[in-house]
Amino acid sequence: MKYMILSYASQQDYDGMSGKDAGDVPAWSPEDMAAMAEFMTTVNKELEESGELVETRGLAAPVHTRRLGSRDGVPFVTDGPYAETQEVLAGYWVVECESIDRATEIAARLGQCPYPGNTYDNAYADIRPIAESAEDMGF
């Protein structure tokens, strides 16, 4: 079964990672970024070697995003970051493994990524099965 592991961040998080002081989010140093990159490279390589990694991507900062919506049948565009929410999808992994329990183990390992300070102590990820067919949707 394939599962998508979704990670979230805010524009402040992206600002902090780019080295800017972002209020409650500490500025990341080059060493902090190197530690994160090394950790992610290691975990992704482990998943590749086990045959469980299908795909992974990080997403650009919310400030570079557009959201298309509709009001009364009229389309509208909102530039990011969105006023409606602080956290947005920051990246994802698609893994193929035996169970949602194994996908949860993988997500927990990803949650061990180093970061400065304690800002991300309450971070979370979603783990969702990927439907391969209409039958998988449960309808």
Image (tube, rainbow, N blue to C red):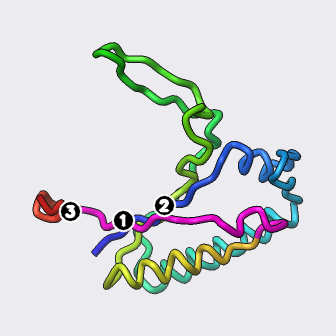
Q: Which mark is residue 132?
A: 3
Element under disc 2: strand
Vertical placement of residue 41 versus 16, above or below: below
Which of the two discs, 1 and 2, labels the residue nearer the N terminus?
2
Other-residue count near label 1 (Cα within 10 Å), few / some / many at <14 / 14–19 / ≥20: some
Which of the two discs, 2 and 3, labels the residue nearer the N terminus?
2
Q: Position of residue 68 (x, y in %)?
A: 42, 26
Q: Are marks 2 and 3 in contact (CB under 8 Å)?
A: no
Question: Which residue bears the numbered disc 2?
Answer: 6
Element under disc 1: strand
Vertical placement of residue 17 versus 86, above or below: below
Please tell me in which quadrant of the rendered image residue 130 appears.
bottom left
Q: Which residues are magenta?
A: 115-132
Quick one: quadrant of the C terminus?
Answer: bottom left
Q: Which mark is residue 128?
A: 1
Disc 1/disc 2 C-alpha distance (Å): 8 Å
Q: Position of residue 97 (x, y in %)?
A: 35, 81
Q: Give the dominant element type of the magenta stretch: helix, strand or loop.
A: loop
| Residue type, label 1 | Arg
| Residue under the image location 59 percent in, 48 percent down | 87
| Residue under the image location 50 percent in, 79 percent down | 106
